[in-house]
Amino acid sequence: MRLFLNYIWMYRRLLLIVLTPLLLLPVPLIIRTKEAECAYVLFVVAVFWLSEALPLSVTAFIPALMFPLFGILPSKSIASTYFKDFHLLLTGVICLATSIEKWNLHKRIALRMVMLVGTNPAWLMLGFMFSTGFLSMWLSNTSTAAMVMPIVEAVAQQIINAEAEVDAMQMNSSDGIYNETFELDENNTEMGTKCDQEKHINGYSNGTAAMYNSEKCMADKEHQSETCSYQEKELPEIPSTSEMKYRNKKDHMMCKAMCLCIAYSSTIGGLTTITGTSTNLIFAEQFQTRYPLSTEINFGTWFLLCIPITLILVILSWLWIQWLFLGLNFKEMFKCGKEKTEREIASAKVILDEYKKLGPLSYQEIMTFILFVLMALLWFTRDPGFIPGWSALFPQYKGYATDSTAALLLGILFFIIPAYPWKREIAGKIRTFDYAPLITWKEFQACMPWDIGILVGGGFALAEGCEVSGLSQWIGNKMTPLGSLPIWVIVLIACIIVTSVTEVASNPATITIFLPILAPLAEAISVNPLYILIPTTLCTSFAFLLPVANPPNAIVFSYGHLQVMDMVKAGLGINILGVMVVMLCISTWAIPMFRLDVYPSWAPIIAATNSTALLTTFTTPL
């Protein structure tokens, strides 16, 4: 019997793949409608996405397979949904990210921002959080966490070593202190490789994880080029918490707090921009596809909406983690004019040493930064709303240029601008006329998240099928009784549901499943769809509870300082704070920004015009 159960457990994913379509088959066979057939496809895809029995991107192709067979959409029509404006925007953003990571601009920004806040442990944590959050606005959350964590680990270990030597000196009545500088050995701190890691938690991660290299995975000896690559590697052996040596409990708590700060700030920072997380991009594209006449959502408006959320949540998270692991000592945090402790001197030294290793600002970093600023400015000024943007220069083509237009313009320049415009010295030899762009196509290919592109395309296909089959309308009609509830209650329920689901399912899968359901709900109760879709999109990123909830959590957990319960305790508080801040946003400054209190003209008019009419309909006796 035990052997049989072992076999069942071994082939659980295969059984789920086979049994799910068979057990759900009575739905389209008994209820012979297009809505039922589309619901069957939706259920199968949802089960596979939530359980990750198949890789997410493979599951994304199921609508392309099943919709033509059920007669919901022809194959040519559904194929066009797999490549949208989103993919062009993603292409331009990845060009920028590739250049930033190749030329180490991200490390310079992170170290410089940490140096600005000082070396007091509490302020050091806040500095790491702000620098990590800023980087994750423009880079992927995973690569940001993987890049910053080795620096944080080095600082933490240097602090522990410095204080240990101080204690040893005091015990031995030594006249001086010899503090051996802790070198930031990326070969050790980055899990035994030169590559930063990104854990893709999917159905086939038995002892392996996809390692995302955001830092020079391959170094060409002649060109010293840095590239990104995906490769399957066995997870490195990290010493467990019990095996790691800490001077005392306070040191252990400090390491835990610093790790969690990086994990959470890399996720929170990504909320700020449309391009910061895949969930934001999925929302923006699906929203524009469903409501093509809407002009509310663009890079500038989203940034203005979310920057207060990010700042508030980063500060609250910092205070929460500080209180939970180290205690809040405001007198110590805000001390003025006192001499620095050995802990502060040690952390300042390792950060300064790492910054010096980068050398002077290079031409490549300057050009990358200029293009980065230009891309951000073009995004902000395309259609800011309060003044005419540069898109107004083409009045006869209103709506033609989008954020992807600016991203592609600057993205292409990365392949044109020379990386070495002057004489170049390589291995002691000076070579001229060696043209090489800032990034190459191979480097771009290695950094491009093709799986996310396919996953998003599958979400668009699923949403299109729900719309054409009438399933979205049917779901909306069935949810009309919710019109009797206050709108803030509906939003809160939706936020709690997606925050819970995203802890066990990937963020892109969660938002892809819920958007086609929540949009018809908003239309059915005659509420501005943004009133429900914006908070649920933001809450989809609140996967703070478990190591497997998102890749940044997995990265910091792999360093061995944390236990699962540490992350659960801290993450539960951050989840609650996050939902509260989002509810505050949607009830205050978001209302005048998007006129959430008015049902917009770009949204379809359903039978009932407002929730009061719906309530009357459902309460009037027959």
Image (cartoon, helix red, strand yellow):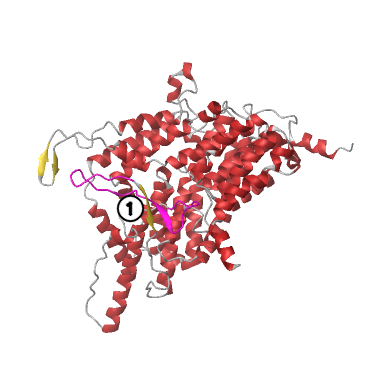
Residue positioned 24% across, 51% down in the render: 358
Between 427 and 270, the residue placed more toward the observer is 427
- Identify residue for label 1: 195
Residue positioned 71% across, 38% down in the render: 29
Residue ranking furthest to the left: 429
The boundaries of the magenta stretch are: 199-228
Name which quarter of the figure residue 95 lies in. Answer: top left
Name which quarter of the figure residue 332 lies in. Answer: bottom left
> How many C-alpha atoms fall within 10 Å of the one at disc 1: few (<14), some, or many (≥20)?
many
Which image quarter is the C terminus in? Answer: top right
Which image quarter is the N terminus in? Answer: bottom right
Counting from the top left corner in percent of width and height, residue 212 is at: 38, 49
Q: Is 151 displayed left or right of 456 in the figure?
A: left
Counting from the top left corner in percent of width and height, residue 313 is at: 51, 52
Labels in figure, total = 1
Residue ranking furthest to the right: 622
Between 595 and 570, the residue placed more toward the observer is 570
Counting from the top left corner in percent of width and height, residue 109 is at: 33, 48
Q: Is 436 displayed left or right of 129 in the figure?
A: left
Q: Is 524 displayed left or right of 78 in the figure?
A: right
Residue ranking furthest to the top: 396
Counting from the top left corner in percent of width and height, residue 292 is at: 56, 27
